[in-house]
Amino acid sequence: MSAILPRASTFSKGPEFWGGKAFTPRTLCAGDGAFVYNAYDWREYLDWVSSLGANLLGHADSEFTRKIVQRLHQGTSFSLPHYLEQVVAEQLVAVLGAHVPGWAPDGLSVRFGLSGSDACSMAVRLARAVTGRPHIVMIGYHGWGSEFIAGTPPAWGVEPQPVTNVPFGYKFEPGANEVACVIIEQPCQVAPPDYWAHVQDFCHATGALLIMDEVVTGLRFGLGGAAGYHGIHPDIVCMGKALGNGIPISACVFPREMGAWFARRDPVFVSSTHFGCTLGLAAANHILSRWTQADVDHLWSIGQHLTDGLRDIGYTVDGYAPDALIKDTPARRAYFITGMRDRGILCNRPNIPNRAHTLEDVTRTLRAAFEVWSEMQTVDVEAAVGDNLPETLFANR
């Protein structure tokens, strides 16, 4: 972005990962409902990316904002745990205990972090302690922790670790008893038949723990996340993004007997000054006390109308309604993203509806997508884009 700020603090938000080195807008300054605004000229854009899934209610939701401002006036960090840690933990186990297969509220414990990376690293560390095994298998992206980046060459600055990175849809062979855990996310890809059951069966057969990374899918796929949607009984669940509606908070949820590992005199050590920050807890308290199945249904309905409409135009769309992606060549993806941007729409990084999106937004988006599709049938897309292609990280995943 500049010599003093060479990249955006979150790689995936960097404009070069949207539409190449010349992509604009470079920065945003505000949001309202389903819309965001350019920091340079306040141009309005319809936002389908929802802050990479962190925005659940829509930008600057009035009731949510009032709750956060109220909490801010009462303090954000204290010298003993804030009472909201217990309140939000109870809310979270009540929701997941009722909607994740094989779980019950009275058998769960929680530990909070600030980011999805925190939760996933915490889960893997816990799994290694519980099983006494070093090896982890990861399927998808689970954050910037060394446990995961070690499996993604060249992994600069990270010491080698016993990590195996396999693609979504990979069929496990019997054995592999040294595996501590399989950590898996639901990507923008429809699962092969019986795949989730296969992963669960492998873990049960080998004693590996099954960690569901629900950082993106939590509360969006359902009140029980992707685990509930696919009927999977995980050992550990990682939550983030939508849990705080844009305020940093994450959570690792696990059976109560595993929680004892954090209460020992020689604990599994996971601790930070800002874990338990009251802004994140207040955000999660608001979400968990108000998010209902009707809200989930709204995300699925809006997402389904959008993906069905894109497919009717001719686009190849993969994934599920709450989290879907148009798949195409890098040049055609860049042309599409830029063409939609020209029409005041930010999308396909991927498309993640929030509660503020409406059918009118879908209609506007499909109208623009049809225009871009029609253009792409009449121009040399490769020549038009040239070398201004979106940058890619983790091409081997």
Image: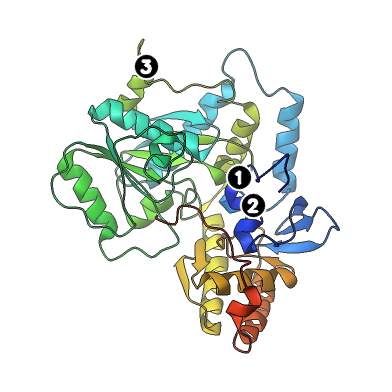
Q: Position of residue 166 (x, y in %)?
A: 31, 52
Label 3: which secondary element: loop
- Position of 78 relative to 296 (above/below): above
Most foreground residue, 297 or 210 = 210
**Outermost residue, left side:** 175
Q: Position of residue 27 (x, y in %)?
A: 75, 52
- Position of 28 relative to 22 (above/below): above
Q: Earlier in the sequence, mark 3 or mark 2?
A: 2
Instruction: Identify the residue position indicated by label 1 in the image.
Output: 10
Tell me if mark 2 has few (under 14), some (14-19) or many (20+) residues whose alpha carbon lies within 10 angstroms of its own. many
Rendered image: mark on residue 14: 2
**Outermost residue, top side:** 265
Three-letter amino acid code of the residue under disc 1: Thr
Label 2: which secondary element: loop
Task: Give the side of residue 47 with respect to residue 87, left or right.
Answer: right
Q: Quick check: can you spot residue 355?
A: no
Instruction: Identify the residue position indicated by label 3 in the image.
Output: 267
Tell me if mark 1 has few (under 14), some (14-19) or many (20+) residues whose alpha carbon lies within 10 angstroms of its own. few
Most foreground residue, 278 or 70 = 278
Task: Give the side of residue 129 with respect to residue 115, left or right.
Answer: left
Instruction: Please name the residue shown 52% across and 36% down the image.
Output: 250
Tell me if mark 3 has few (under 14), some (14-19) or many (20+) residues whose alpha carbon lies within 10 angstroms of its own. few
